[in-house]
Amino acid sequence: MGEPGAPDWTAADTLHVFMRLRCEPEDIPEDVLNPFGKGPYLSLEEELRLINKQVEDSEGFDINFKEFRDIYNYQPVDFDDTEYVMPPETHGDLMYRLSRDSLEIYNERKGTRFELVKVIKANYHETGIPATMYFITFQGKDPSDDDEPKDFRAKVCHFSYSPNKYHSCELKPEKNVHFIETEEQEYAKKRRLAEELSNAGK
């Protein structure tokens, strides 16, 4: 695929974001608008900045498409659609298959025994060639573990006429929650500490 010696575009952590269609609600039929965009709408520059940030921060897995009126080369997967598959398979069937295969590779690499529970969501990136990059979030569970299923994220390049390329499959990173104290709480805390030190010196 591609010219010999050309860089492997599929190896990038995230892929370039570009706008496929600029949607002006007053000028374009309703069925052409981004079906997820709800407004209030941002300017083109604001939208591009926002979607690029979301793609970069989440590596393509978590994008809030409701914030955009325009249609970009990153889009959510419609599990009932059949555009990139051969019927009777649906995109949902494909996401299940790619998730299952990704989890098998993860188990082989990590020595674990996770089984696929369900596919939660997926985004795709159009490449301009007969291949589509998928960013899939799914749940897996170890049959011997009583804990709740764990969230996984897999990045897979699905080729129309070549073997798929399984780039990564990892546990979804947990969000770091930081407790931010108000100025009043911080002042009270410092005052208590000062009083404790003062009493200890008596």
Image: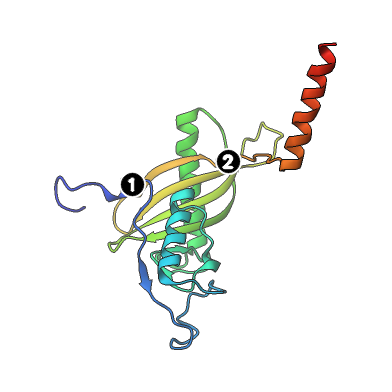
Q: Is residue 80 above or below residue 175?
A: below
Q: Position of residue 164 (x, y in %)?
A: 35, 49
Work out which residue is located at the far left of the displayed protein and give it: 4
**Distance between mark 1 and mark 2 Cα atoms:** 28 Å
Please name whichever residue, 155 or 96, is drawn nearer the observer in this view of the structure: 155
Asked if the residues shown at circle 1 and circle 2 are in contact, with their CB atoms under 8 angstroms apart, the answer is no
Residue 194 is marked as none
Indicate which disc, 1 or 2, sits on the residue closer to the N terminus.
1
Please name whichever residue, 9 or 192, is drawn nearer the observer in this view of the structure: 192
Which residue corresponds to the image point at 34% horizontal and 57% vertical from the top-left? 16
Q: Position of residue 100 (x, y in %)?
A: 50, 46
What residue is disc 1 on? 12
Work out which residue is located at the far top of the displayed protein and give it: 202
Q: Quadrant of the C terminus?
A: top right
Q: Is residue 44 above or below residue 6?
A: below
Task: Give the colour scheme shown.
Answer: rainbow
Q: Position of residue 12 (x, y in %)?
A: 33, 47
Q: Is residue 3 left or right of residue 86?
A: left
Q: Residues within 10 Å of mark 2 (few under 14, many from 20)?
A: some
What residue is disc 2 on? 115
Q: Position of residue 44 (x, y in %)?
A: 41, 71
**Corner quadrant of residue 194:** top right
Which residue corresponds to the image point at 66% horizontal and 31% vertical from the top-left? 144
Q: Secondary structure at mark 1?
A: loop
Q: Residues within 10 Å of mark 1 (few under 14, many from 20)?
A: few
Which residue corresponds to the image point at 54% horizontal and 30% vertical from the top-left? 112
Which residue corresponds to the image point at 58% horizontal and 40% vertical from the top-left? 115
Q: Is residue 91 left or right of residue 6?
A: right
Q: Which amino acid does the dot numbered 2 rest on?
A: Glu
Query: Which is more foreground, mark 1 or mark 2?
Result: 1
Q: Which amino acid does the dot numbered 1 rest on?
A: Ala
Please name whichever residue, 127 or 113, is drawn nearer the observer in this view of the structure: 127
